[in-house]
Amino acid sequence: ALDALRANGSHNMNKATEKIIRRSGGKTGESLTKAEKMSVFLRKPVTFWEYCSTGMARYRSRMSDGARNSLLVITALIITAT
């Protein structure tokens, strides 16, 4: 929020607005944490423990692959609609 404020208009006129934003917890882009890119996160290999636990969870639920895929599609549609 502070970056957008500084980019628009003179700094002298926006001092009061900047003070309000800082008081309410506004930050600059540089002060935010750097999130890991999704491509880096997805590139990590699946551990043996994750592989086994996923397989056991699927076995215990006794849900077919088709039913699980249908549930995933319906969930994605609900999330995008809301």
Image: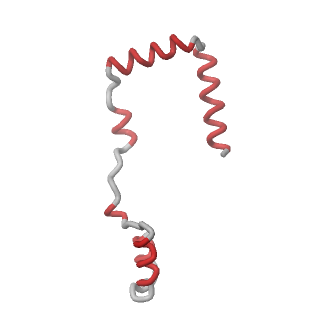
In depth, the one of 37 and 61 nearer the eye is 61
Instruction: Count the labels in the image.
Output: 0
Note whether 16 is above or below 67 in the view shown: below
- Identify the image quadrant of residue 31: bottom left
Note whether 50 is above or below 62 in the view shown: below
Please identify the quadrant where the N terminus is shown. Answer: bottom left
- Residue shown at 48% from the left, 16% from the top: 57
- Is residue 58 found left or right of 64 in the rendered image? left
- Residue shown at 34% from the left, 32% from the top: 43
Q: Position of residue 62 (x, y in %)?
A: 57, 11
Q: Position of residue 50 (x, y in %)?
A: 37, 21
- Identify the image quadrant of residue 73: top right
- Residue shown at 42% from the left, 67% from the top: 26
Q: Position of residue 80 (x, y in %)?
A: 63, 43
- Identify the image quadrant of residue 32: bottom left
In depth, the one of 79 and 56 nearer the eye is 56
Most extreme residue toward the front, as rendered? 23
Instruction: Name the colouring of the figure.
Output: secondary structure
